[in-house]
Amino acid sequence: MDRKKAGVPLVCHGHSRPVVDLFYSPVTHDGCFLISASKDSNPMIRNGDTGDWIGTFEGHKGAVWSCCLDTNALRAASGSADFSAKVWDALTGEELHSFEHKHIVRACAFSEDTHLLLTGGLEKILRTYDMNRPDAAPREIDKSPGSVRTVAWLHSDQSILSCCTDMGGVSNKNEKTDMYCYPQRPHFVLNLWVSDLVNCKHKRVAPRLWDVRSGKIVQTLETKATVTSAEVSQDGRYIITADGSSVKFWDANYFGLVKSYNMPCNVESASLEPKYGNRFIAGGEDMWVHVFDFFTGEEISKYLLLLKLK
């Protein structure tokens, strides 16, 4: 039997320019929420189940490249081309803090315990801001090998995931120097960092990470395409990446590729629904947010999504 063609997808219209980042909050007492970033400079928060608009965070003076919500969905954060990362009250839309940078901020992420905000961008520096002392100077982690495109926390805040530009191809271990060398071909790689802010005790993961103290790459995921987005699912099982033409799901502990789906449109970002884990969203140049079945990769019709998902 021929597979039935998907109907009109459920979409969350509202942005006037391309959607470049999407983020599902964890499931809270009030449900789950979806925040989106766009080149129109206005992050938006929505109901994560229905896509209904809740509010818009106004204050950036440039394209917003990254957005996230904290564990309780009480605060939002955004990174922008106006050289700032802002923290917002997710209930009122009020700007709580604005952290100035020296270049474009392309990535931001709250730690699971909500105490830290991690940022990165064209300065090639990862910074952590203490949300309990927002006026204090940020903690800086050693320079990234390239411009930081996306950041996330892994393994209960014990590790940091960073996607950056790098002059290289497939990483190959040099047995004589115990370092990694790269062919001279620009591409984007995903690097895992061991945070120098915490004592990493995760035995399965520690040997596979980039140790920022030694400067050695010990794990690189080859995506073979420009990675524009990478995040960790709320249950900690998957790393989700978007690279324009596809969305990929990687095992967050062993880093093997689990699923890869070609997209019907160019996508800049993707996020896995946190409540049931049976659908994911993707957005990009067409200014819409599309919903897909996690198990098949099929685009879900508007009618099907209105049904109770179990």
Image (spheres, grey):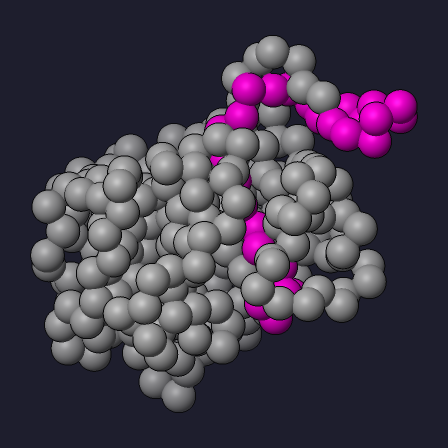
The x and y percentages for residue 249 are 61, 47
Spot occupied by residue 132 in the image (x, y as percentages of width and height):
35, 79
Quadrant of the image for the N terminus? top right
Instruction: State left or right for residue 191 relative to residue 244.
Output: right
190 and 98: which one is in front? 98
Please identify the residue farthest to the bottom as the structure is shown.
29
| Residue at 21%, 79% in the rendered image | 91
Image quadrant in which you'd find residue 194: bottom right
The residue lying toward the viewer, choosing from 135 and 13, is 135
- Location of residue 297 in the rendering, given as x and y in whole percent from the top left corner: 55, 45
Q: Which residue is at the front of the view, 169 or 31?
A: 169
Quarter assignment of residue 24: bottom left
Q: Can residue 52 be seen in this view?
A: no
* Residue that appears at 15% across and 62% down: 57
- 176 lies above or below 255: above
Q: Quadrant of the C terminus?
A: bottom right
- Find residue 51 and report its horizontal and vertical position in percent: 28, 63
* Depth order, front residue of 302/278: 278
Q: Is residue 172 magenta?
A: yes
**Residue 185 visible in the picture:** yes
Q: Which residue lies furthest to the front in this view?
A: 137
Give the mark count. 0
**Vertical comparison of 242 with 202: above or below:** above
Q: Does the magenta stretch include residue 163?
A: yes
Q: What stretch is highlighted in magenta?
A: 155-180
Extreme right residue here? 175
106 left or right, relative to 211: left
Seen at 89% across and 23% down, the residue is: 176
The residue positioned 60% from the left and 59% from the top of the image is 196
Q: In this view, does 156 lie to the left or right of 106?
A: right
